[in-house]
Image (cartoon, helix red, strand yellow):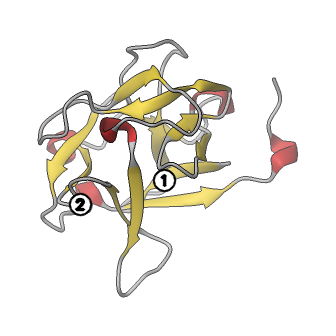
Amino acid sequence: MAKIYYSADNSWLIGVTDRVQGNRLVLLPTSTDNLYTEWDFQPDGGITLHSDPTLAIDCGTVSAEQYLYLNTYKKNNASASQQWQFDPQSDDAQSGYIENVSNSQLVFDLQWRNVAKGTYIWTYTANASDAEIWSPVPVPQDSFKK
């Protein structure tokens, strides 16, 4: 289990505002309830919501400028639009791109680099901007309460 922090300002992280299919990923303050901000990295490349492992991060179509949202996930059977990998920066192994497995040029991106509650996270062509650098940080298992 991990939280995915915005590397340029670690008082922000990736989350959702509701645990339902179709809910878009947004930037949220670190004070947001864990139910909406903790993720599990699956062996098949899926990133699932810890509080509901039947929902995974999806981009719908593997292309640029697609909003990331929660979609139905089948264990060990992530679709191409649900498969992600972490690519650490050369100078900081704790932060880097979260890129699509089938097209590593498509990465998680903070839309318009707007650091504010509710800003959407979408796919964008990697360009080394701060908007694309994230830090997945493990969370102790005992911190999560249902």
Q: Residue at x 80, y 53 (%)?
A: 140
Q: Earlier in the sequence, mark 1 or mark 2?
A: 1
The image quarter in which residue 112 lies: top left
Q: Nearer the viewer, mark 1 or mark 2?
A: 2
Give the amino acid at mark 1.
Tyr
Q: Is residue 139 visible?
A: yes
The residue beneath circle 1 is: 5
Which element type, helix, strand or loop, lies under badge 1? Answer: strand
Image location (x, y in percent) of residue 124: 15, 48
Give the amino acid at mark 2.
Ser
Q: Quadrant of the C terminus?
A: top right
Image location (x, y in percent) of residue 86: 42, 63
Q: Residue at x 24, y 30 (%)?
A: 67
Q: Which mark is residue 47?
A: none
The residue beneath circle 2 is: 104
User: How far, Cα to Cα, is label 1 from label 2?
Assistant: 20 Å
Q: Is residue 69 left or right of residue 106?
A: right
Q: Is residue 26 visible?
A: no
